[in-house]
Image (cartoon, rainbow, N blue to C red):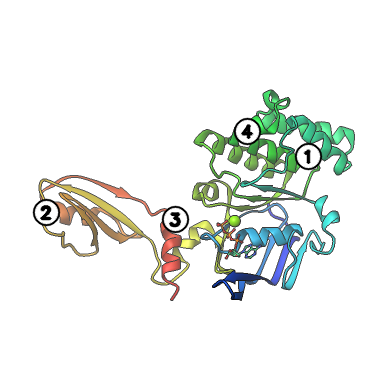
């Protein structure tokens, strides 16, 4: 349900870090790291956008600039019409942030005391606070945890607690930096279900960084891929497959033969792996597997077979590989 108004906009945004490295006892070397190297995109109100890329790509740095924690080295950046670095406090009322790797909650306080502090910090009106807290407690299963000090919570419980904390003041935008990292399957499902509902019911805009491609598959219609501080792709998840020439995805036919033979030779597929009597044949994702199966069965002692669909992790890896 995306509107037309751009809630987040970046125009040629850069972040350069000066890093000093000791190269020997006497000498230090100064080096610049271009963590974000000229990124432009817009996110409309109500969108859920995935922001993905390999380690060190610049994802967290981008999120930190979008919250005002870091000041861009160049370019223009606006969130809800606000320049984050210049008006960080005013922006804080419009955004919620969850960093999966660390908590914003007070370690020694019971969850509900942390929430009380948030309420005072953000001057949240009593009725609204109660309503938001109730919704989060209900949907994120927090009722039993409210009196527990944060340090005693499991990672999944803490993450749910953190997500609630980020939403008590009704932000327009929620930034999530690896919100499912380290969570078990059940906790991940809970978090994803909650975010879907949040977006559907309140229209909260979500920018999500993750290494878990299921997060993207289940939550995001749009995905941006960043590498070395540059935007490599921006579009629907399905389009990633066709993002680069030579990077179109392949399906894999896995065949079990009666015995070990040399690599199978059939038209329209190539062997990518052999393990004893089992062989893996890659073929274009758009092609039918039927003729291939028939050709293999006609000439080889076929016992069993299965077809594997391409996953996006594989597709993204190809995309990087295709970049000279
Ligand atoms: N405060 C800093 N000082 C110097 N270099 C930094 C700083 N923060 C990040 N970097 C560097 O900037 C680059 C981008 O880092 P960033 O944390 O944004 O990556 P990321 O995409 O979030 O990676 P990950 O998937 O590992 O979380 C990396 O090379 C990193 O080492
Ligand atoms: Mg990161």
Which numbered disc flags the more N-terminal residue, 1 or 3? 1
Q: Which mark is residue 168?
A: 1
Given this view, does label 3 or label 2 mark the residue nearer the observer?
3
Which numbered disc flags the more N-terminal residue, 1 or 2? 1
> Where is mark 2, residue-wise?
298
Q: Which mark is residue 317?
A: none
Which numbered disc flags the more N-terminal residue, 3 or 4? 4
Residue 23 lies, in percent from the top left, at: 54, 72
Q: With 292 as the anchor, is 2 left or right in this view?
A: right
Which numbered disc flags the more N-terminal residue, 2 or 4? 4
Given this view, does label 1 or label 2 mark the residue nearer the observer?
1
Q: CA distance from mark 3 to mark 4?
A: 28 Å
Mark 1 Cα within 10 Å, few/some/many (few <14, many 20+)? many
Q: Secondary structure at mark 2?
A: helix
Above or below for 23 versus 136: below
Given this view, does label 3 or label 4 mark the residue nearer the observer?
4
Q: 128 or 3: which is nearer to us?
A: 128
Residue 261 lies, in percent from the top left, at: 10, 55
Given this view, does label 4 or label 1 mark the residue nearer the observer?
4
Q: CA distance from mark 1 to mark 2?
A: 64 Å
Which numbered disc flags the more N-terminal residue, 3 or 2? 2
Ligand number 2: quarter of image = bottom right
- Residue at (25%, 50%) from the top-left corner? 254
Number of callouts: 4
> Where is mark 3, residue-wise?
313
Q: CA distance from mark 2 to mark 4?
A: 55 Å
> Where is mark 4, residue-wise?
157
Which numbered disc flags the more N-terminal residue, 4 or 1? 4
- Residue at (85%, 54%) from the top-left corner? 89
- Residue at (79%, 35%) from the top-left corner? 115
């Amino acid at each position: 349900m995306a509107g037309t108004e751009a809630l987040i906009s970046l125009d040629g945004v850069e972040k350069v870090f000066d890093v000093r490295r000791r190269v020997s006892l006497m000498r230090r070397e100064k080096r610049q790291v271009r963590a974000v190297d000229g990124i432009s995109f817009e996110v409309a109100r109500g969108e859920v956008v995935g922001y993905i890329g390999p380690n060190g790509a610049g994802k967290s740095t981008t999120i930190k600039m979008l919250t005002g924690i870091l000041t861009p080295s160049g370019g223009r950046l606006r969130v809800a019409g606000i320049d984050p670095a210049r008006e960080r406090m005013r922006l804080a009322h419009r955004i919620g942030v969850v960093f999966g790797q660390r908590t914003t909650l007070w370690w020694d306080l019971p969850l509900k005391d942390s929430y009380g502090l948030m309420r005072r910090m953000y001057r949240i009106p009593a009725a609204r606070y109660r309503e938001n807290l109730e919704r989060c407690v209900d949907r994120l299963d927090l009722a039993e945890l409210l009196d527990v000090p944060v340090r005693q919570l499991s990672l999944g419980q803490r993450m749910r607690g953190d997500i609630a904390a980020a939403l008590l003041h009704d932000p327009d935008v929620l930034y999530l930096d690896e919100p499912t990292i380290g969570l078990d399957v059940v906790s991940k499902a809970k978090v994803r279900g909650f975010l879907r509902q949040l977006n559907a019911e309140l229209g909260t805009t979500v920018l999500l960084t993750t290494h878990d491609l299921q997060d993207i598959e289940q939550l995001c219609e749009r995905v941006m891929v960043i590498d070395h501080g540059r935007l490599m792709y921006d579009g629907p998840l399905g389009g990633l497959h066709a993002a680069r020439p030579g990077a179109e995805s392949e399906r894999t036919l896995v065949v079990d033969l009666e015995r070990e033979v040399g690599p199978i030779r059939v038209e329209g597929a190539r062997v990518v792996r052999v393990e004893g009597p089992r062989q893996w044949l890659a073929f274009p994702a758009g092609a039918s597997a039927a003729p291939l199966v028939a050709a293999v069965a006609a000439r080889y002692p076929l016992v069993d077979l299965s077809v594997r669909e391409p996953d996006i992790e594989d597709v993204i890896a190809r995309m990087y590989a295709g970049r000279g």
